[in-house]
């Protein structure tokens, strides 16, 4: 039986474990957290960092690996590339697309080069240079690690008071120690989940994204299709096509974050040449009948791609989250929730007795709720009903414990 390596064992990688198994592969999962969801899902689980490809290959010994994949994780993409080289698998992500995924400053250069709506930024690894740049850029500013994801290490600053603290916070979540300062763009947040096949934009979903706002700036929900007019949609698909042509991304999934300003400008914030996180493939499957996880695995295996949309429905993915740190004592209303006709899928990653954390980081999710409907209004009403139906009972931590 041939092996499929999946780097990462979190909720956004689990669909690749299941899909890989369904396609007949022996799944090897890698995650440094011993309690990662992937530990129980893999045929073989390596408890080690996914950022050490040589170490992974050493631990696995002489085996036959058909493909390596890591949905949703930017941090793992360089390891995916290196392991794909070591095992001579059929597909490699284009180097320019890979670099965009792990270096936000490089992505900004690509945007500037293409003449797409751009904002001011500065990237560096020294406090002195960043302080000088911040004074030139002015405020508000968003300070981010150049190579992280899941909104880790991000601070929004209204003035210079906490700049050094924000840089140090970004460093904690950066491997490269490169920190990017960006002008903060005001507007509606959105995302693009797309798939290229043979150099062509074969699929593109645009979502409205609801975020928690500063300080965390993490996703709470996505709704598809985004509330965009036809011209904005056309501009977006042209821009996505131009970006991918520029970085040589001819095949495979690619995910973008964006902000749509009140004036109608579309600003790309970041790019990941991989499947999106936050349950994006799950939502795509329900909204469009397209299995992008299967497609991404087939691409990694070197098989021919068919990217077919079977229907178009209005869908929402809501991240289920806790309001405080504590112990989950009960999940109430799950059966009633599943009886709501618009509920297409509910996944809960935690069980009573587990310690849970407030939703201040993208990693602290309790689950995903996917809802499908025919109109946005009906979907939003049903989502309200669903969120009133499901309750997570949490015994909050006593201060100083846990
Ligand atoms: N320059 C910016 N202007 C406005 N919002 C931003 C900006 N940069 C980031 N954000 C918001 O913060 C989120 C996280 O930033 P992002 O660059 O996507 O980092 P990550 O790789 O951690 O997802 C974005 O999806 C967006 O909602
Ligand atoms: Mg992002």
Image: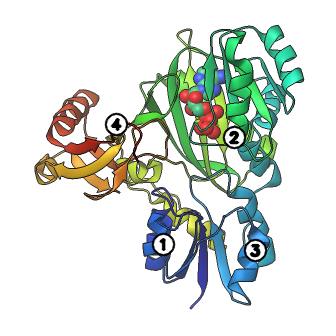
* Residue at mark 1 to residue at mark 2: CA–CA distance: 26 Å
At x 70% / y 82%, what residue is drawn? Answer: 59
Q: Earlier in the sequence, mark 4 or mark 1?
A: 1
Q: Is residue 177 left or right of residue 210?
A: right
At x 11% / y 51%, what residue is drawn? Answer: 339
Can residue 139 be seen here?
yes
Q: Report if the CB atoms under discs 4 and 1 are less than 8 Å apart.
A: no
SS at badge 2: helix
Residue 220 or residue 16, whichever sits in front: 220
At x 25% / y 37%, what residue is drawn? Answer: 374
Residue 10 or residue 287, whichever sits in front: 10
* Residue at mark 2 to residue at mark 4: CA–CA distance: 23 Å
Q: Report if the CB atoms under discs 2 and 4 are less than 8 Å apart.
A: no
Q: Earlier in the sequence, mark 3 or mark 2?
A: 3
Q: Earlier in the sequence, mark 3 or mark 4?
A: 3
Name the image colouring. rainbow
The residue where tag 2 is placed is 172
On the image, which quarter does residue 244 sit in? top right
Tell me, for residue 55, which label it has, or none: 3
Q: Quadrant of ligand 1?
A: top right
Residue 11 location (% of width, % of height): 45, 57
Q: Report if the CB atoms under discs 3 and 2 are less than 8 Å apart.
A: no
Residue 27 location (% of width, % of height): 53, 78
> Where the N terminus falls, by quadrant?
bottom right
At x 52% / y 58%, what residue is drawn? Answer: 307
* Residue at mark 4 to residue at mark 1: CA–CA distance: 26 Å
On the image, which quarter does residue 139 sit in? top right
* Residue at mark 3 to residue at mark 4: CA–CA distance: 37 Å
The residue where tag 4 is placed is 324
The residue where tag 1 is placed is 39
Q: Earlier in the sequence, mark 3 or mark 1?
A: 1
Q: Report if the CB atoms under discs 3 and 4 are less than 8 Å apart.
A: no
């Amino acid at each position: 039986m041939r092996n499929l390596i999946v780097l990462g064992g979190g909720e956004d990688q689990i669909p690749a474990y299941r899909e890989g198994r369904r396609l007949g592969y022996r799944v090897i999962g890698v995650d440094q957290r011993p309690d990662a969801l992937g530990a129980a899902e893999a045929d073989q689980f390596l408890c080690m960092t996914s950022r050490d490809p040589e170490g992974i290959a050493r631990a696995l010994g002489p085996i036959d690996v058909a493909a390596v994949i890591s949905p949703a994780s930017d941090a793992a993409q360089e390891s995916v590339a290196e392991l794909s080289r070591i095992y001579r698998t059929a597909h490699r992500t284009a180097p320019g697309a890979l670099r965009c995924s792990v270096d936000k400053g490089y992505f900004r250069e690509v945007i500037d080069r293409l003449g797409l709506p751009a904002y001011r930024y500065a990237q560096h690894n020294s406090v002195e240079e960043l302080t000088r740049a911040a004074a030139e850029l002015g405020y508000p500013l968003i300070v981010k690690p150049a190579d992280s994801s899941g909104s880790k290490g991000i601070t929004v600053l209204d003035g210079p008071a906490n700049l050094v603290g924000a840089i140090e916070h970004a460093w904690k979540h950066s491997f490269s120690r490169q920190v990017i300062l960006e002008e903060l763009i005001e507007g509606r947040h959105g995302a693009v989940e797309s798939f290229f096949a043979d150099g062509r934009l074969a699929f593109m979903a645009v979502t409205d994204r609801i975020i928690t706002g500063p300080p965390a700036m993490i996703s709470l929900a996505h709704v598809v299709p985004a509330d965009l007019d036809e011209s904005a949609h056309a501009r977006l698909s042209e821009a996505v096509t131009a970006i991918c042509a520029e970085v040589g991304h001819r095949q495979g999934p690619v995910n973008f974050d964006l902000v749509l300003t009140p004036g109608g400008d579309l600003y790309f914030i970041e790019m990941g040449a991989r499947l999106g996180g936050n349950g994006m493939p799950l939502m795509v499957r329900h909204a469009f009948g397209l299995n992008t996880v299967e497609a991404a695995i087939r691409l990694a295996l070197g098989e021919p791609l068919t990217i077919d949309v079977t229907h178009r429905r209005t869908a929402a993915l809501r991240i289920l989250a806790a309001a405080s740190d504590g112990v989950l004592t009960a999940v109430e209303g799950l059966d009633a929730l599943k009886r709501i006709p618009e509920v297409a899928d509910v996944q809960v990653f935690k069980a009573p007795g587990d310690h849970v954390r407030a939703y201040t980081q993208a990693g602290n999710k309790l689950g995903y709720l996917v809802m499908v409907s025919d109109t946005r209004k009906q979907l939003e009403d049903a989502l309200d009903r669903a969120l009133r139906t499901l309750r997570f009972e949490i015994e909050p931590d006593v201060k100083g414990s846990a």
